[in-house]
Image (cartoon, rainbow, N blue to C red):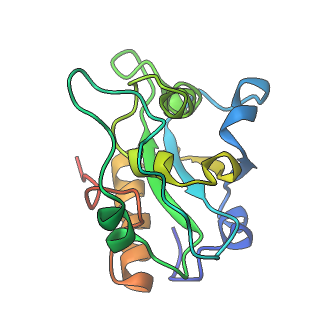
Amino acid sequence: MGSAAALTQRDLESRGFSGFIPFEELPNINVPDESGIYVVLRPSLTAPEFLTASSAGWRGQRDPTVRTEQLAAKWIQEAHIVYIGKADAGAKAKHGLRGRLRQYGRSGAGSSGHWGGRYIWQLQDSSSLLVAWCTTPGVKPAEAEADLIDEFIRLHGKPPFANLHKGNRN
């Protein structure tokens, strides 16, 4: 996906990412139903305020809320990207980018559809977060996701704020 850069919106656009819209606008946008990767960005680099309770839906008996101290320990002040994810398409996956991103957005409104990346829903300004996506023809989304997370780690020393694992290469 290119050499290490600042991973800004401009850099991501030059790599083929599009969108850069709030989750609430997803139903009105023609997001591809193909496989790909996506990022969630926080436009501001100011220190965040963390909510004591998540707006995300529970997953069975599991509460998505974590302690604000845990969130603060994961925060990376100089990074706009707060999450990197992948979406598979096809008969088994069903989702593609369109379905996966809508599922993620619904989780912030109380649905339990997207457990990974749930930390973003404890950001006080989560409604201002932007989502962008890029299809990955000829590349498995898991590989593209892991490559971008690796690049992020080279820049910042750890994965994005809401990535709870390093990414899967499968």
Residue 146: x and y, percent?
A: 34, 60
**Where does the image place residue 166, in percent across and percent down from the top left?**
27, 61
**Vertical placement of 115 versus 158: above or below?**
above
Q: Position of residue 32 (x, y in %)?
A: 64, 31
Residue 91 coordinates in the image, percent (x, y)? 39, 15
Query: Is residue 140 among what the camera can see?
Result: no
Q: Please report the residue visible at 42 percent of the width from the left and 71 percent of the height from the top.
A: 75
Q: Nearer the viewer, residue 55 or 42?
A: 55
| Residue drawn at (33%, 27%) of the image | 58
Residue 3 versus residue 24 in the image, above or below: below
Quarter of the figure with residue 116: top left
Q: Is residue 148 left or right of residue 116?
A: right
Q: Residue at x 42, y 83 (%)?
A: 156
Could one spot residue 93 in this view of the protein? yes
- The residue sitting at 70% across, 65% down in the picture is 43
Q: Quadrant of residue 145?
A: bottom left
